[in-house]
Amino acid sequence: MWVVIAIFAVISGCSRLTQNEIISPYLPVSLEDIEEIRVGDEAHKALFESQNPYQAPKYKLYTIPELHAYVSYIGKKIAQVSERPNLPYRFFILDSDDIDLFGLPGGRIYITRGFFYFIDSEAELAGALAHEIGHIANRDYKPEGYNKVRKGYDLVLKGAQEGSGLAGTYGSAAYAGVRAIGYASPRIRNKFKGNDEEEADADAVFYMTKAGFDPKGLYRLTDRLSKVPVEDVGRFVDYMKGHPPDQDRRNFLQKKTRKLKFTPKPLYRVTADHLTVVPGTAEIVIKSQAGMVGDGKSGQEDVTAVPAAAIGTAT
């Protein structure tokens, strides 16, 4: 009798763990966090897989360890002052000329190689990362939506697969088409609501100030996005759809940062995407590649210095 009661008590105790309750001091995430991380892991794999046998994956990683360390150093420094510092934040650089930066559930953030050619300072990079961390901290990437899309896709794919053997060439074509939809589905970006964007901007300003980055960098980035030449706007489409640099947003950021008292650290320019370790020094520097500097002029070189400790803390 007492054994049954004890077992019931244990089971009842387990059932009292709510979705939002932290599991333990050693595993400081909730069941809801774990589900979000799982969904993000699945979506991450889908980004680098092609479900279409006739098409290569859209993305591949841009593997320069020092640059990855630099981005991770900034991103993790900001994430640690967010409302969800215990998520496993991970940062990835994509080998793409497009100007884009986006996130996935659970703390994964992606930045394209092309983004480095557009940003004009470390503060702008920090602003873009802080804004995305704001979306993740506010749970704007809803795992439920992804799960519904994936469940529906799996059912349609199963039907197309079964029909492909019955309908010959047309069935095979339909099957390939459905697989292509599966390839695209994880890449359908969140179109954040206006209040989501404003909340992420407000959080980003707070994070940047607390982490030691100039919060005006996000306003400057948004303002420059609004002035992109129309002939170049094609490379900005994905980023602008998720983060439109409209007048209301610019006004909000300008007002939010105008009266902030911030003592900036020495200003460094970030206009290139190649980072090298200088032998015999305690610095890492970002150097422009010949003919590929941010202002479009050849033969110039901009150098950004960051602490060498960034490498050790940004894995």
Image (cartoon, rainbow, N blue to C red):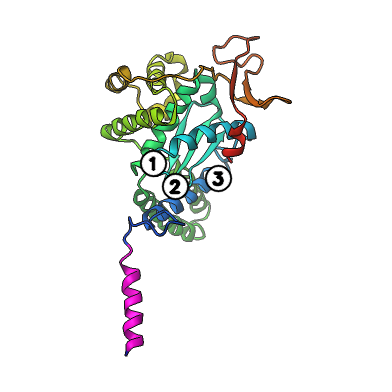
- Residues under numbered marks 1 and 2 in contact, where contact means CB atoms less than 8 Å apart: yes
| Residue 87's disc number | 2
- Residue 159 or residue 36, whichever sits in front: 36
Q: Is residue 43 above or below residue 272?
A: below
Q: Please identify the quadrant where the N terminus is shown.
A: bottom left
The residue shown at (54%, 24%) is: 116
- Sequence order check: which comes first, mark 3 or mark 1? 3
- Sequence order check: which comes first, mark 1 or mark 2? 2
Q: Which residues are magenta?
A: 2-17
User: Which residue is tagged 3?
Assistant: 50
- Left or right of 236 in this view: 249: left
C-alpha separation, residue under disc 2 versus residue under disc 3 = 28 Å
- Residue 43 or residue 216, whichever sits in front: 216
User: Which residue is tagged 1?
Assistant: 136
Q: Is residue 2 above or below residue 199?
A: below
Disc 1 marks which amino acid?
Answer: Ile
10 Å crowding of disc 1: few (<14), some (14-19), many (20+): many
Q: x and y percent of residue 22 in the render?
A: 37, 56
10 Å crowding of disc 2: few (<14), some (14-19), many (20+): many
Q: Secondary structure at mark 2?
A: loop
Q: Secondary structure at mark 1?
A: helix
C-alpha separation, residue under disc 1 versus residue under disc 2 = 9 Å
User: Which label sits in the foreground, 1 or 2?
Assistant: 2
- Among the 4 quarters of the image, the one containing residue 187: top left
